[in-house]
Amino acid sequence: MSIGISKASKEDAGFLAQMILQSSRAEKKIGIYDLVFGVKNDDDLLSYLEKLVVTETKNHCHFSNFLIANIDGKQVGTLCSYEPRISTHEAFIKSLEEINYTGDISEYEDILTLCDFEQNNRTLIFDFMEELEGFINVGVLKALMQKSLLTARLKGYRIAQTIVEIGSLETILLYKKLGFKEVKQKECELYKEKFGRVGLTLLEIEF
């Protein structure tokens, strides 16, 4: 089974939206983008996410940050890597303005303030590492990570980080198999109140 890795394009917006939603929920009833957009059905939420990934402003969900894994012409996985100095919170807000979204995102911003880790602008951030059901454990995520680390090295990065929910044992184990180590945990009452998870774990890899 041959795994191809390619850069995402605007035409991949639908698949990227699906993977972003899958990653953000991580088997929870709701995820962070349910809070951002406050809609009651998945079709509306996916529509917003599709618009978000193709804005002119390079937010952290932007298609240009993504690699896509393909097997036999089928898209089966994604990995996003973004630079915090470029894909800032201000860029995210500007992207929401671009898609004419004017809803209340105060709950999302409260979680960023109280529950998140301070990002180092010299560190690359990995996010939305996902694969379709039926293609788990066939090497998709390893192939995506190897390509992403090679690209990161060419950009001059030597450290990358990712944030995973405390208690997401399978995901944490997967990152550790890929070479990451746990460096910090942050418990957060607000995160537990909204999502039923205790808080977040910061993992890091040097390469």
Image (cartoon, rainbow, N blue to C red):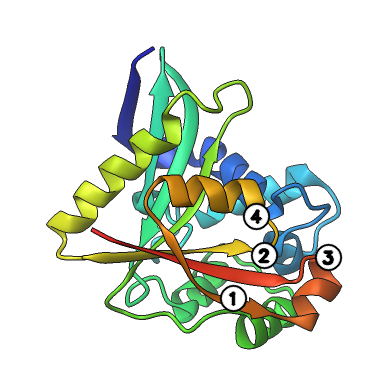
Q: Looking at the image, tell me whether mark 1 or mark 3 is earlier in sequence order.
A: 1
Q: Looking at the image, tell me whether mark 4 or mark 2 is earlier in sequence order.
A: 4
User: Residue 8's image quarter?
Assistant: top left
> In 3D space, how far apart are the residues under numbered discs 4 and 2 (Cα atoms)?
14 Å
Q: Which callout, 4 or 2, points to the residue nearer the camera?
A: 2
**Residue 100, x across and y down, in percent:** 61, 66
Residue at coordinates 70% horizontally, 59% vertically from top-left?
167
What amino acid is at disc 2? Ile
For disc 1, the marked residue is: 185
Give the answer, above or below, for where 148 lies relative to 60.
above
User: Residue 160's image quarter?
Assistant: bottom left
> In 3D space, how far apart are the residues under numbered discs 3 and 4 (Cα atoms)?
13 Å
In this rendering, would 179 be left or right of 25? Answer: left
Q: Which mark is residue 196?
A: 3
In terms of secondary structure, where does tag 1 sit? strand
Check whether the beta carbons of the residues at disc 2 and disc 1 lie within 8 A of each other. Answer: yes
For disc 2, the marked residue is: 166
For disc 4, the marked residue is: 24
Whether residue 104 is visible: no
